[in-house]
Amino acid sequence: MEDLLRPIYQERASHANTLGIVLLEKQKPDNPATDNFDVVLFVIVNKKEPGRLLKHYQLESGKVAGLKIVDADQVDKWINLGTNRRIIDWIMNGKILFERNDYLTDLKQKLFDFPLKDRKKRIGLEFAKLIKRFKDGKELFEAGHMLDAYNYMVHALHHLARLSVIDHGFHPEVTVWNQVKKIEPEIYKLYQELLESEETLYKKLELLFLASEFLVHSSTKVGALHLLEVMDENEVWTIQELSTHDELIDYSVDFEALLEYLIDRKVIKVRTEKTKGQGIYHRIYSSF
């Protein structure tokens, strides 16, 4: 397969803008790791290129190959935010066909090391998503919308699973539940119960909320660490200052739900300042 694709990747390797090329072959039918292509060529470039960044090839053997071109800034963003775990799998497990100045070797080492600073932010992002999904799911459950509550809780458990994997020093994989089964069997059991229990949907969700509340509470200290370290930079903050801080802007729509949760848990303090309006006050935030 590699020999058949050699003219394609050698042409890409000749470009000064190309930093690295990885090849990943499908190991079994319906393998999600390759987007169901028989083989993927993943090309990382220094600067974003105009035109087509995705190409499909039909080989004489009947197999299908995909060529994906992504700039390094986008790859860094996917890694730092955890928004494309498939790319991480390709870099970690793919065969390096070409690299410039050890780019891919260094990137793989960074992924393997998973520096503490990067882990803290990733955990914070997952924890914020967990809080938002858990809170919304509980409100839907109490309003009697069982199927919607179920959907939110599936997502909440996924965020709890990824948080746990990251806290143990690993990047969450596409098959994250295989990781969680070994690392945190308690979380895996909750997910299994949600999917397989013969209880009514109402009863399954009722029990799940009780069990999850404890796990969410237990994750608060590690989940809030990134935010609290940022807040230590100043004594007090407005919501505008917090939500637009370079380190916090990626929390996006989940940030305010996280903030309110941490206030309820007495992890973050609130005080008020007068405004020009009678009986209206600004909320000011600080860590304890």
Image (cartoon, rainbow, N blue to C red):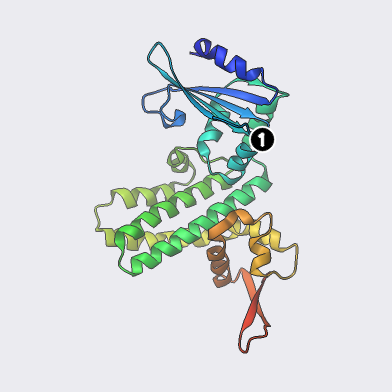
Q: Is residue 151 above or below residue 91?
A: below
Task: Give amino acid for label 1.
Answer: Lys
Query: Closer to the camera, 6 or 106?
Result: 6
User: Relative to 83, does residue 246 appear above or below in the rendering?
Assistant: below
Residue lying at 68% horizontally and 31% vertically, measured from the top left: 46
Dividing the picture into quadrants, the one containing residue 82 is top right
Q: Quadrant of residue 142?
A: bottom left
Position of 110 with respect to 55 (left or right) is: right
Residue at 46% from the left image edge and 62% from the top image edge: 214
Residue 219 seen: no
Residue 131 pos. (x, y %): 50, 60
Q: Is residue 103 above or below residue 63?
A: below
In depth, the one of 258 and 43 nearer the eye is 43
**How far across and down, in percent of the image, does residue 133 sit?**
45, 58
Q: On the image, numbered disc 1 is attached to which residue?
A: 110
Residue located at (64% from left, 29% from top)? 45
- Residue 223 in the image, given as x and y percentages of width and height: 58, 57
Q: Quadrant of the C terminus?
A: bottom right
